[in-house]
Amino acid sequence: MVTIEEALKIITGQQVARKTEFRNLSECLGFSLSEDIIALFDMPSFDNSAMDGYALCGLSKEYIIVGEVAAGDESRHTLNEGEAVRIFTGAKIPENTTAVMMQEKTRVTGSKLFLDQEPKKGQSIRKKGEELKKDQIVFEKGYTITPAGIGMLGSLGIDKIEVFKKPLINLITTGNELVMPGKQKKEGQIYESNSFALAAACEKYGFHSKEKKQIEDDFKAIKAGIKESLENADVLVLSGGISVGDYDFVKQALEENGVEEQFYKVFQKPGKPLYFGRKGEKFIFALPGNPASSLSCFYIYVLPLLYKLSGSLKTGLDQYTFAASLEFENRSDRPSFLKARIDNNEVEILDGQGSSMIQSMALGNALAFLDAETSVKKGDEVKCYLIS
C-alpha cells in the first residue's frame, strides 16, 4: 500500500511517448500545443482607430473634414494641422494623426467638425505592436487551447496548428449485478452507472472515451476483454473487481495480460483498492466499483496522467483553500476526500459520504481533503479540489 503522495508521484513520474498531429484551427479546442507559437508580425500591424469617430491633426475643438477612412481601406491619407477625417473602428489612421475623438462627442456642420471637449494626444489610437511584438512568444508549448486562444491564433493568420494527440481511452465495468439503464432490473441487481460517469468526466476535461464495455464477473471474459481493449487504447480504465472478494478477478487478469503493477492500494478513503499498472506505452487504472470511489479516484489520479499524456501544462484539478462553514469531524483512520460544496468562499462538507453515495457528489462542486482523525471548526481552512 502507498500513500496518496507516493501514488501521485508514481503516476506523474511515468515516462511517456507523446505523439503530435496538425489540426485545423476550428478543430483544436482543448488540445495542447506541441511547440511555442511565435508572433510573425506586430499586432496590431499598423496604428488603427479604437472606435468610430474622427481622426484629428492637432489639439483643438474645431476642424475641417477632408475625407473618410473605412476599415480595410488600403489608400494612404495624410492630415495637415486642423484637418480631420471620418474614421471607423479598426481603420488605419492617417499620417500625422494626433488623436481620435469618438463620434458621440462631436457635431458636424457642413465640412466643419466641432468637438465637445479638447482631445488628448494619442487617445483612442491602437498603436502598432501594442498587443504583441514580432518574434514575441504568444503561447508556450503545452498551452491548452481555449476559445480565446483560437481567436488569437486566427488573428495571427494561423489555420493549422501542431498539437499533442490526446490519449485514446477505453472503459470497462465489471459485475454480475450490473444492468444497463433502460433495461428491467431484477431483485439483487443495480443499474450500471460508472461507465457513464467516467465517460462524462473524460468529456468534461477535454478527453473522449472511445469504447465502453460491461463484463460479468467471469475471469476468462475479463481477461479477454482487457486484452482486446488494450489493443487500441493508450489508457484503460476499469471499474469494479479490484478488491479482494471471491469474484474480484481484475488484478489477476491484468497480470496475465502482461500488465506491470506500479502500485496497488492507496492509504485513503474512499478508494483504497486502487490499482495502477503499465504495459509498454499503455497505462491501466483499476478503480473501485462504488460510484463515489470510482469518480473520486478518476479526478485525483487518472486526470493528471491524461493531462501528462496530452502534453498539457495542467497537472490535475484546481486546488484552493476555503474556510469551513460548519464543524466536521473526520473519524476515519485514513486521509479522506470528502464530497463538499463551495459557496460564498466557504466550504460545506456534505452529508452522504458513503463510497456508494453519488447524489451528494452530484450536488457538490468540490472534494475537501482532510487528514485522518481530524476535526474541523467553523472558519478553519480546508484544502479543496474543484470538480465543477
Image (cartoon, rainbow, N blue to C red):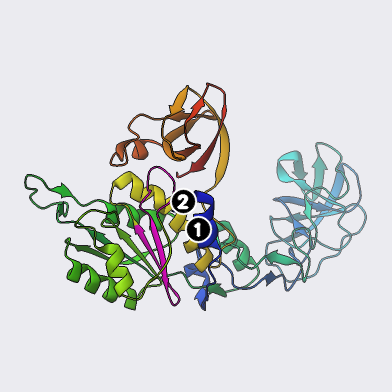
Q: Quadrant of residue 174?
A: bottom left
Residue 116 painted magenta: no
Q: Nearer the viewer, residue 226 or 61?
A: 226
Residue for point 83% across, 37% down? 117
Residue for point 69% across, 59% down? 90
Residue denoted by label 1:
304
Instruction: Please indicate, yes or no, whether residue 365 appears anywhere in the rendered image.
Output: no
Instruction: Please indicate, yes or no, whether residue 364 appears anywhere in the rendered image.
Output: yes
Residue 276 painted magenta: yes
Q: Position of residue 9 (x, y in %)?
A: 55, 58
Other residues around mark 1 within 10 Å, as few (<14) / some (14–19) / many (≥20): some
Q: Is residue 52 left or right of residue 15?
A: right
User: Mark 2: which amino acid?
Assistant: Ile
Q: Position of residue 123 (x, y in %)?
A: 82, 47
Q: Which residues are magenta?
A: 265-286
Q: Nearer the viewer, residue 359 or 247?
A: 247
Residue denoted by label 2:
300
Tag 1 near tag 2, CB within 8 Å: yes
Q: Quadrant of residue 262?
A: bottom left
